Every structure is written in structure tokens, then in C-alpha cells.
Amino acid sequence: MILALRKKTKIVSAILFILLLGFLLYINIPFLMPFLIAGIFSLGFDDFITRATTGWKIPRWLIIIFILFSGFALFWAPLTLATYRMVNIFHMPDSLNTSHISEQLGTLKVYTMELVQKISKLTGLDITSPIQDGLESFVKKVGEIILSLSSNLIRSTPSIAFNGLVFSIFLFSLSIRPREIRSFVLKYSPLNELLTQKVIKNLKESCSLTLYSTFIIGLIQAGIVILGSLIFGEGDFWIVMPVTCVLAFIPVIGAGPMGFLLSVLAFIGNRIIAGIGMLVFSTVASTIDNILKPMLIGGKDLKISPVLTFTCVVGAMITFGIPGVLIGPIIMNIFIRLGPLLIGEFSSMDK
């Protein structure tokens, strides 16, 4: 048996390599998600870093450090302040009942019930009681969900900080020497060199497209709505901010609906100027992607069904959590870009 195995050295070597690789991946499972996200950012920003290095004559490592610090400022500052607000709510729950957002929602509830009562009088049907009960039940459930999410966020803050550190190390390591990584991939890729280069090109374009069209534009849209909320004092800023950021990354929905909701609350509360202001900010946030996309990604954007985009993003968020915001669109873009390429390769092999 041993002699037979020695005659099949390549097969045995391949099996051993797969086993060792499997064990290596298994012990690094806790770092898989930070590594994957770092790889997405590294591929997506590679062209920008290269252009900045050659055009501005700035060392590559300095540009990477700048991107890391900018990203952490945009991420950690709001997260820290939002967490602080949640901790205060847990310590002083009564403060939420007297907050501006609670007053606005109370006004909306009163306005809705008055409208329902008018409809009941016109139709002669008693719909006030069931709608009131349903509305109170809905508000209670939403409050429980928000409370659960807030407590989970607070508990997971140390884990988020650790993963953020690991992500930074991976991103710097992957971005500092792209040529060496590319040469390694070309050398050990099971695909031929030409196909491997096409795969790398499409991976970079997919990551870049997702970062600019989903992540960066989403942040800009959320920032516009949040800025309007801050200027006109509509809603609780530290509640509006995380909700708007999450909505901004969901296709079809976006950050606009949160702004329109705040505008409606302002009009109901007879704050006309604030209502008009929030309406303007929301409209800008909802339409600005039509201006930014051509500027940031040119003609690289693929014409993909909004339904498919929605299911991929929401499905990835359900599967992977918040990282699914990036992973979902990237998997979708990679499939749409590489699918025809690989099918064409199979067809050429048959011929």
C-alpha cells in the first residue's frame, strides 16, 4: 500500500495540502470576516491608492494610514456617541419618554387617531378601537426590538473594537504590497494566466463598484438626512443616525424615507419651516446618487434588477449580519461579471 501511494505522489501531496489548508482556515475562522472585509476594501481602493501614489507623490503606506484613520473617524465617533446615548437611556429610561422624538411620535399617534375617528364617523364603522390596539401593540414591539438591538450593540462593543483592529492590520498588509500578492496569485492559480488576470480585474471592479455605489454613496445619503435632522432639530439625533445609516445601504429603500418621515412629523407638529427643510434634504438624499454614480464609477455600473439587488443585500445581511451590506452586492456583481466569462471558457474547452 505504501509503495502504491509513493507512485501517486502528486495525489497524496494534493490531499495533504488540502488537509493542511483546511486546518489553517479552521483555526482562523474567528478572523475570516475581518479578513474578507479587508480584502474587499483593499481591492476596491487599490486603483485609488495607486493613482494617489503616482499623482501626488505620496508614499503608499501614508495614504493607507490616512484611509484607515478617516474610516475609523467616520465609524467610531458616531458609534461611540450612539452607544453613550443608549447607556444613558438604560440608566434613565424616563429620559426617553420626555425626549423630542417621543413627543413627535406622540403627536403623530394623536393625529392618526383623530383621522381614524373621522373615518369611523363617516363610514359608521367602529374601527377606532382595533386600530388603537394594533398601533399600541406595534409601538410596543418596535420598542422591544430597538431595546434588544441596543443592548446587543453595547455587549458587542469590545468584539467590534477587536475586529476593527484585526481589520486594520489585514487591510494595511493587503494594501501595502499589491504586486507581490498579484504575483503569488498568478503563480499558484489553478486557472491559466490570462483567465486569472481577467478574474482579478473583475474582482477589483466588483469591489470598487460596491464600495463607491453602495457604501460611500450610502454614507453620503445618510449624512445628508442626518445633517438635516441636526439642523432642524427633528427626531433624536442618536436614534435617527444609526437607523438612517442602516436604511441607506438597503437598495430600493435608502435613507430618503427616514427624512420624509421626519418631514411629516414636523408638518403634523406645525413646524412648517422644519418640515420644508427636511423635505428638501430628503429629496436631495434620494436623488443625489443619480449625480454621484456617474462621477465615482463612470460607466462601470451594471444594469441589475432592483429586485435582485434588494434580495442579495437583505439576504446577505440576514446571513452575515452588518457585513452583508458589502458582501451581498459584491457576490452579486462577481457572479454577473464572472458568470459569462467562465461559461465562455467552458464553451471554448468543448470546441
Image (cartoon, rainbow, N blue to C red):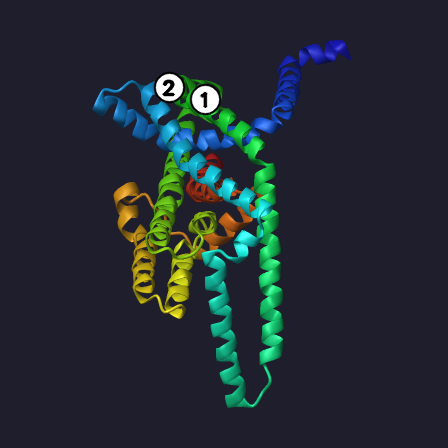
* Residue at figure coordinates x 57%, y 46% from the top left: 150
Dot 1: element? helix
Q: Is residue 119 above or below residue 197?
A: below
How packed mark 1 is, by other alpha carbons closer than 10 Å (few <14, some 14-19, many 20 or more), is: some
Q: Which residue is mark 1?
A: 185
Q: Quadrant of residue 177?
A: top left
Q: Which residue is mark 2?
A: 179
Dot 2: element? helix
Give the x, y percent position of residue 14: 62, 19
Give the x, y percent position of residue 129: 62, 78
Position of 148 with respect to 189 (left or right) is right
- The Cα atoms of the two marked residues, 2 and 1, are separated by 10 Å
Instruction: Say which of marks 2 and 1 sits in front.
Output: 2
What's the mark number on residue 92?
none
Q: Is residue 147 above or below residue 197?
A: below
Image quadrant in which the N terminus is located: top right
Pointers 2 and 1 in contact (C-beta within 8 Å): no
Position of 213 with respect to 103 (left or right) is left
Q: Is residue 21 above or below residue 291?
A: above
Q: Earlier along the polypeptide chain: callout 2 or callout 1?
A: 2
Give the x, y percent position of residue 192: 44, 25
Q: Amino acid at mark 1?
A: Val
Farthest residue toward the right?
1
Give the x, y percent position of residue 186: 43, 21
Foreground residue, 194 or 38?
38
How packed mark 2 is, by other alpha carbons closer than 10 Å (few <14, some 14-19, many 20 or more), is: few
Residue 198 seen in the figure: no
Position of 196 with respect to 4 (left or right) is left
Foreground residue, 7 or 325?
325
Position of 74 with respect to 103 (left or right) is left
* Residue at figure coordinates x 54%, y 57% from the top left: 97
Q: Amino acid at mark 2?
A: Arg
